[in-house]
Image (spheres, rainbow, N blue to C red):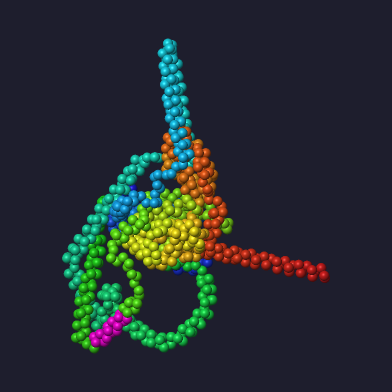
Amino acid sequence: MSQSSYGRMWDAAQGALEYLLEDEYPTMQLHPQKDRMQVFQTLATFYLRYLKIFRALEEVYDQLVHPQKRRVVHQVLEGVMGRLVELKNEMVELEYSEFHFFDDILQDLKMTPEDLEVPIPRYFVREKMRALKEREKMLAHILAKGGRQEDKTQVPVLQSMSIERAMWLLQVSERARQGRLRAHFMKTIRQEEQRRLQSSSSSILDPDRAATCIQKVWRGYRDRRRVQKECLEEMIFLGMIPAQQPTPTPAQLHAHQLDSRRHGMQEENEAEYQRALANIKESVQCVDGPDIKESLQEQIRQWFIECRDATGKFPDFPSPEDGGSASIFAQKTPEQVAAEFAAKEEEREKKKKSKEDKEKKGNDRKKKKKGKMKGKKGKGDTEEEEKGWKMTPSNFLPTVVEGAKLYKEVWHYRDEKQNFLQSFDAQLVREEKRLEVEEELRVQVDELMRQELKNLKLVVDRDKGKKKKKVKKSSKKKKKKGRKTGKKKKKEKDLTADRTIESLYEELVLEGFIIRPMNVKLSDYIGEYSYLGTTLRQADIEPMPSLSDVRQLIALYGILPLGSQCVHERGPLIRAVLLTGPAGVGKKMLVHALCNETGANLFDLSPSTLAGKYPGKSGLQFLLHIVFKVARQLQPSVIWIGDAEKTFYKKVPKLEKEMEPKRLKKNLPKVLKSIKPEDRVLVVGTTRRPFDADIKPLCKVYKKIILIPRPDYASRFILWKELLQAGGAQLGPKLDLSSLAKVTDGYTQGHILQAIQTVLNSHRLNQQTKRPLTAVEFIPPLARLDPVYKEEEEAFKTWYSRTPLGKKRARAARASEEEADLKKGKTKGGKLQTKGKEGKNKKRKKKK
């Protein structure tokens, strides 16, 4: 696609965003909604529409070359990302569930389940690729220096083998060697017999007969090949066999080359734009600076004269906090400005008087207010219930609106046909720099004009000048009071003030607290969308979430806030996330994918890593101080706590008492509170046995809990297909993937991967052409593994129902059931009463 095509895509996305903003803003002004289903429909519709716009803007930002256009797209893109996170938070608070299902809304908007995937912006990693490469080199150098080539997350190369297994391998290889020798010997004997027969036969075949024989063989081979090809195409068309494309097509290679070329042009244009910013600003300061300064001085002097003529006195010059002279000329007349200053002075005097009155009558008012508040509490609750649901104000909509307005005013109607190279626009740069220079010069002019105004007042109105000095003294006293109150706040001590970040980083790497994440992405976490979620919820059955829903939560709660500073600062603050589920569902893989997608550092604070290191309370405090200091300095950072249940054990097992797994229990909540919105640090815990932990302190630390289920049928089918292809298997008609997906009900992704690795060894892969793979071969290795039974799955469900969010959902379900029962009871009561009256009337008639 060309730059004009991406320009049209940007135009279409901005148009869709404009329509969406028109639909969303009236919801703030409309009456509150009481129907929860209707509220969820509106929120989900907004969420899906924003998701579609987000996908288009991310594609545009990745491929656009124009530096000034990219800045506008980036502003809108970050606003849309933040709005997505806000809408997700609204839906969670509305439904009391982390997982939502959009089956019916997808049909209405004519979208597919693939459109639900949250796209991960590529600029998170691409724009800081150099820093990531340098960090990787430094990490490798430190590990080599410490004598550690590989970290513990990687699978060891050497594996232990039993004697029986070794003997079996030796026997198999010896028998195979003997078989190859016997086959070679029989082949030579057969060839000698054929030669002897050919030499003994003196008869020559008829040419016509020989030609028909050759034609018969060739036609049979050709037709068999054609039929086989047609059958394969039909199976691929029906989706029963995946289309195998081991090598990319020329069109795909050309597209990749164009993408890399555009990224290079982006860097060149950006460097040229940065140089132009400095050069144009210097030229504006030299050429236009004196004229701007003179015009500002004349403008302010004219304002002095006009105010003197209108009010009879010179005005007060605004302080730098109020905006200086810029606040004067904001499309206001001198009389309006003077009236505003007079009103401000009156308000200050009223506030002084009101403070004195409040100090005298403070105790009486407090008592009266307490009594009133007690009486009003019940009314306030009923009023809130009557009000219903309202959309909370957004922190990102103003930025989205500002970006959309900027696009409409500057870029929508701008002719860029002559700008073939898509370089920066010098006229726009000059306008921006002129405003900057004017603001800088205004500060200097304001200081000069304040002095000039003082001199004028001293000459004309000396008494007024003295009064103003007294006011300034009082303001200084107030400032001094503020300083005294500020001294009372305690500052945190820096335990490592004399050490550099590089030395702390090296110490954490050598101790094993900073590890290298595995090279996996979020797209490698394979899973299908759940198509029956809405149907099951309508039938009052709580469905288990799908692996696709888990991917979306990781992207919304982890990747977007860690990748974007704007989203993390102004969005809902998430300090810690807990990933829980059976063994083998991919919890650790998601942690490593989170680091790779955002370029984050990975810190390991698992109990097994902490064992025997930095002993005592002071040692633990020093360690946490180092970890969080380095994590803040080198953000984004992910702090991983494996086996998170051990930190909050109800009772520590005897075998683990020496490890002291509960060392972090007291200090972890305190350290989490120190994470501020500007710190892109996320604590991620993983556990496969959450029921062993005390649930209250666990839920206080981990506000967001994501329950990862075992894969359903659709996810298992895709897992088998993708993992077999990745392992080098040839998928043919004899390999029934549907049966494998059905048989492996209860097995996790780890179990399936382990079975594939045991079957697809090098020897078996070489035999695929002669002996195709079958589903039966994968059954024996699966039979040796223990699946996830229903009892374990129910244990996870019951544990999750005891979490704060699970309790809220249970209460909401009970409340809805009670309302439904009340409605039914009213209708039944009405029918019974009428029946009773009819019976009494019949008895009276009989007596008569």
Position of 390 relative to 45 (above/below): below
- The C terminus sits in image quarter: bottom right
Q: Is residue 623 among what the camera can see?
A: yes
* Residue 478 included in the magenta stretch of the image: yes
> Which residue is pictured at 50% across the width and 62% down the height?
651
Residue 393 in the image: above or below residue 68? below
Residue drawn at point x = 19 percent, y = 66 percent: 285
Residue 166 image-quadrant placement: top left
- 202 in relation to 569, above or below: above
Q: Nearer the viewer, residue 189 or 336?
A: 189
Q: Is residue 383 left or right of residue 683?
A: right
- Quadrant of the rendered structure where residue 514 is? bottom left
User: Residue 257 appears at what percent x and percent y?
Assistant: 31, 45
Image point (51%, 75%), residue name: 380
Query: Horizontal and vertical percent for residue 419?
Result: 26, 53
Q: Quadrant of residue 255?
A: top left
For the image, the number of numbered tags is: 0
Q: Please name whichever residue, 191 or 302, is drawn nearer the observer in this view of the structure.
A: 191
First to last magenta residue range: 464-482
Rendered location of residue 395, percent (x, y): 39, 66
- Determine if residue 296 is in view: no
In percent of the image, x 54 and y 76: which residue is there?
A: 378
Vertical relation: 639 (above or below) 525: below
Measuring from the top left, give residue 415's x and y in whole percent.
28, 55
Q: Residue furthest top?
A: 202
Magenta segment, prevailing SS (helix, strand or loop)? helix
127 is within the stretch colored magenta: no
Q: Nearer the viewer, residue 113 or 717?
A: 717
Q: In this orientation, which residue lies closer to the viewer: 19 or 398? A: 398
Q: Is residue 611 left or right of residue 2?
A: right
State the residue lying farthest toward the right. Answer: 848
